[in-house]
């Protein structure tokens, strides 16, 4: 009797069938076990949704309250009434805010407006809204008012907000500074937060009830179920506290438990259907694959074709020729086609991913490789760095010597970059081995004079600095191209993964931001920091408004006297620009000059300052009230070949001798491009204008560096002056500067004089001139006229004091 021998198909079918049956049983049993867990998770999810929506709605309420306060400040009537402390007018203007659209439309419920002075003393309050005595007003949101009173300096301009309650009534408070950069007081905007939280019902699609801590409802949805409706027994509470931690409101939503249970049952049924269908499909697929084993060569060919569709790297691989005559012919034809495709693909890949001039990878390959490294990091947590590099002064070379010299320079730069990284085993060649090596670093040319690098050996800030310094050092060496000896530099921006981003777009954008920061500050290289990021609303607003600031007559000149220490008479003045922005008030040049330099608007601003300063001070110079006028130049002005002719034309326009004009530049502006700066400075000096180095001692120059430059004056930075009396090291530095400057026939001006002790020591050390708040703050033209007439003392200020 023959024994029963099961077939492979039967064995595999039985195993797969049993596994599918087991999967169905597990799906059925797990549904009941996890139902409670699903309900608990659902409750937590609903709480999180309420929390997020509450945060968004309160943020929106803060913005509307802030807008309400800011719109009031834009009123000329309000500013005049505040200046004159016209309380009756102020109350009228405060009451008018209760008739704003989003107040009358019910978008927010405005409860009270209270106006404080700078010391948080109450000036007045609105008569509309809640009736509060002054004693009660002073106790509204004490956590906010106390915090406002304790603030000093720039902190006073920050808008405060929070939740509080008065007599168990919930309030949302926003404290808005009044007066812009010249703080005049604060406006407290009080609103009812409960009204603004009602949209949570629409957002979640569930009935909502808002209650006070004592259980009293302040809002109940029309759809709120009655106590006997057991279908809505499933409820979720979310509590909101005041800034001081006291209970304020409780938000409750009611969910239909019957519908939720039915949804769970439907889900379980769907799981069963999917599990059954999947099991049935797997059984059929297994039987189909078993049947296909009888034609293995054809199956291999089919599989290879599918692989080629998904992975182009296997193009050119050969299949083993086997099987019947027809299969052999088909396999040989496939192998020949694969070889031809590989040749064509390599040609196209080289064209698509290689820079034709330098033979380096281009932008496309660079971006693909960043994505490869991002994928590696996501799986293996291996950090890497992205470096973007932009050449300095390349445009000058290209425009002056021609594109053929520029092309040769780019080739030489690519070789140096490649060699610098190869010395540290940081990069591999761009060849077949390189293309197949997904772990190798890369040097690429993105276009123009911009290059990029990916370095896997850089895993921290210190390593990135080492690599950047080596690159800068190599590119600072002269390039010898034929008869030309060229000196260029580079600005490098560095972004580290994962520290500065975990995706390709973020890393490239942050490296680009860092690169422009390095170029603007002449630092050589910069590692990305969040504060460098240009993509913020205020920056974009200033950048946009700056383009029309001069046309809108928003710029204004202030002047700070420069005093002769020996005679205590005003020797000259320094012109300082201020931007009177219609929205942000007076803006310091520290905030908008970098924007002007990046947008190119600095050239127009410089021309405006030259023209207006010389026009306004022409009378003072001719009458002898002052002997010189100082005007600041930007590093961008040193790249402007027309700057000398512009200055000459403006001087002639107002008939002012050039000896009266002093041009101030910072150390970094001069040393950032020392060779070209020297050329421009010599050209300006030949016109008999004086050259001054501003903020001397804060950069990386020295008196030895400037001995070959046509410098007439140095201004010692205030960081050395303000500690002069109390710090022996600072005294030694200042003394050394004064001694060397004297031997080099340089005039010395001390900045930041704030007391008589510092002034006395500077005079004893031999300093000639001084500026600072001890004498006068920067002042507008109308105040300067009075100053020059009334502040020409015959004796020392110390004696008169």
Image (tube, rainbow, N blue to C red):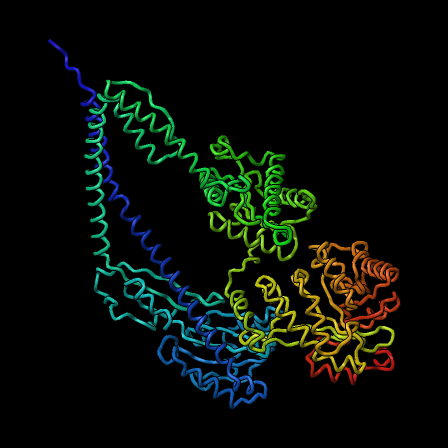
Expressed as whole percent of the image width and height from the top left, the position of residue 675 reads 72, 54
Q: Nearer the viewer, residue 272 or 566?
A: 566
Task: Residue at 30% x, 49% y: name it.
Answer: 38
Expressed as whole percent of the image width and height from the top left, the position of residue 190 reads 46, 76
Where is residue 777, by image quadrant?
bottom right
Task: Residue at 29% x, 60% y: name it.
Answer: 235
Q: How many marks?
A: 0
Question: Quarter of the image containing the C terminus?
Answer: bottom right
Where is residue 690, by image quadrant?
bottom right
Expressed as whole percent of the image width and height from the top left, the position of residue 435 reads 48, 34
Where is residue 349, by image quadrant?
top left
Q: Nearer the viewer, residue 121 or 436?
A: 436
In-image side of 685 versus 551 (left or right): right
As drawn, the residue found furthest toward the top would be: 1
Q: Is residue 773 visible?
A: no
Q: Is residue 385 visible?
A: yes
Q: Nearer the viewer, residue 294 or 723?
A: 294
As drawn, the residue found furthest toward the left would be: 1
Q: Is residue 507 above or below residue 539?
A: above
Question: Quarter of the image containing the N terminus?
Answer: top left
In-image side of 586 versus 327 (left or right): right
Task: Residue at 19% x, 31% y: name it.
Answer: 284
Expressed as whole percent of the image width and height from the top left, the position of residue 414 reads 59, 41
In-image side of 201 versus 467 (left or right): left
In-image side of 19 versus 41 (left or right): left
């Amino acid at each position: 009797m023959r024994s029963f021998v099961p077939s492979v198909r039967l064995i595999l079918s039985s195993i797969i069938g049993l596994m599918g049956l087991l999967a169905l049983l597990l799906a059925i049993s797990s549904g009941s076990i996890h139902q409670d867990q699903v309900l608990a998770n659902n409750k937590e999810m609903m709480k999180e949704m309420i929390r997020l929506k509450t945060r968004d709605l309160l943020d929106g309420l803060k913005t509307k309250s802030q807008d309400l306060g800011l719109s009031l400040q834009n009123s000329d009537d309000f500013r005049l009434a505040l200046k004159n402390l016209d309380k009756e007018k102020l109350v009228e203007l405060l009451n008018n805010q209760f008739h704003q659209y989003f107040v009358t439309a019910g978008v927010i419920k405005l409860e009270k407006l209270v106006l404080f002075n700078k010391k948080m003393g109450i000036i007045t309050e609105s008569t509309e809204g809640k009736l509060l005595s002054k004693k009660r007003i002073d106790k509204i949101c004490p956590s906010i008012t106390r915090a406002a009173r304790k603030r000093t300096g720039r902190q006073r301009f920050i808008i405060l907000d929070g939740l509080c309650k008065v007599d168990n009534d919930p309030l949302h408070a926003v404290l808005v500074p009044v007066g812009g950069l010249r703080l005049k007081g604060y406006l407290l905007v009080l609103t009812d937060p409960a009204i603004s939280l009602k949209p949570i019902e629409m957002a979640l699609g569930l009935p909502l009830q808002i209650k006070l801590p004592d259980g009293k409802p302040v809002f109940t949805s029309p759809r709120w179920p009655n106590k006997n409706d057991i279908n809505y027994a499933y409820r979720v509470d979310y509590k909101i506290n005041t800034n001081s931690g006291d209970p304020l409101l409780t938000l409750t939503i009611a969910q239909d438990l019957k519908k939720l249970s039915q949804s769970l049952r439907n889900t379980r049924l769907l799981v069963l259907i999917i599990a059954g269908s999947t099991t049935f499909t797997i059984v059929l697929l297994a039987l189909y694959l078993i049947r296909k084993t009888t034609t293995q060569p054809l199956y291999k060919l089919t599989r290879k074709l599918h692989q080629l569709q998904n992975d182009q790297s296997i193009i050119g691989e050969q299949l083993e020729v086997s099987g019947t005559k027809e299969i052999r012919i088909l396999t040989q034809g496939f192998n020949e086609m694969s070889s031809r495709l590989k040749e064509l693909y390599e040609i196209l890949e080289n064209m698509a991913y290689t820079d034709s001039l330098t033979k380096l990878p281009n932008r496309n390959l660079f971006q693909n490789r960043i994505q490869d490294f991002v994928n590696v990091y996501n799986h293996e947590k291996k950090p890497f760095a992205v470096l973007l590099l932009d050449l300095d002064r390349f445009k000058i070379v290209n425009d002056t010597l021609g594109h053929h010299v520029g092309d040769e320079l780019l080739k030489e730069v690519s070789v140096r970059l490649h060699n610098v990284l190869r010395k540290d085993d940081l990069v591999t060649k761009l060849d077949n081995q390189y293309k197949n090596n997904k772990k190798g670093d890369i040097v690429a040319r993105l276009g123009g004079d911009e290059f990029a690098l990916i370095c896997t050996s850089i895993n921290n800030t210190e390593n990135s600095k080492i690599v950047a310094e080596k690159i800068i050092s190599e590119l600072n060496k002269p390039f010898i191209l034929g008869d030309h000896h060229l000196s260029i530099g580079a600005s490098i921006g560095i972004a580290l993964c994962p520290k500065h981003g975990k995706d390709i777009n973020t890393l490239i954008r942050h490296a680009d931001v860092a690169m422009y920061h390095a170029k603007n500050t002449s630092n050589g290289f910069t590692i990305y920091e969040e504060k460098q990021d240009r993509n913020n609303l205020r920056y974009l607003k200033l950048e946009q408004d700056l383009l029309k600031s001069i046309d809108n007559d928003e710029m204004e000149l202030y002047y700070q006297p420069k005093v002769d220490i020996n005679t205590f008479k005003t020797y000259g003045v320094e012109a300082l620009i201020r931007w009177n922005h219609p929205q942000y008030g007076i803006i310091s040049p520290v905030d908008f000059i970098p924007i002007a330099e990046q947008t190119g608007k600095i050239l127009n601003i410089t021309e405006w300052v030259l023209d207006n300063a010389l026009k306004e001070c022409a009378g003072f110079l001719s009458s002898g009230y002052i002997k010189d006028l100082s005007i600041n130049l930007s590093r961008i002005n040193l790249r402007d070949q027309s700057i000398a002719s512009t200055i000459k034309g403006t001087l002639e326009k107002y008939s002012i001798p050039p000896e009266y004009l002093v041009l101030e530049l910072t150390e970094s502006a001069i040393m950032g491009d020392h060779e070209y700066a020297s050329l421009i400075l010599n050209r300006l000096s030949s016109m008999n204008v004086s050259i001054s180095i501003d903020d001397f001692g804060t950069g990386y120059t020295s008196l030895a560096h400037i001995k070959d430059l046509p410098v007439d004056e140095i201004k010692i930075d205030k960081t050395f002056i303000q500690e002069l009396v109390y710090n022996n090291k600072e005294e030694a530095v200042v003394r050394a500067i004064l001694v060397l400057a004297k031997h080099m026939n340089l005039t010395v001006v001390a900045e930041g004089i704030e007391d008589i002790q510092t002034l006395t020591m500077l005079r004893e050390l031999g300093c000639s001139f001084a500026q600072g708040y001890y004498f006068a703050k920067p002042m507008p033209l109308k105040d300067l006229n009075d100053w020059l007439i009334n502040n020409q003392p015959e004796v020392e200020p110390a004696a008169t004091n």
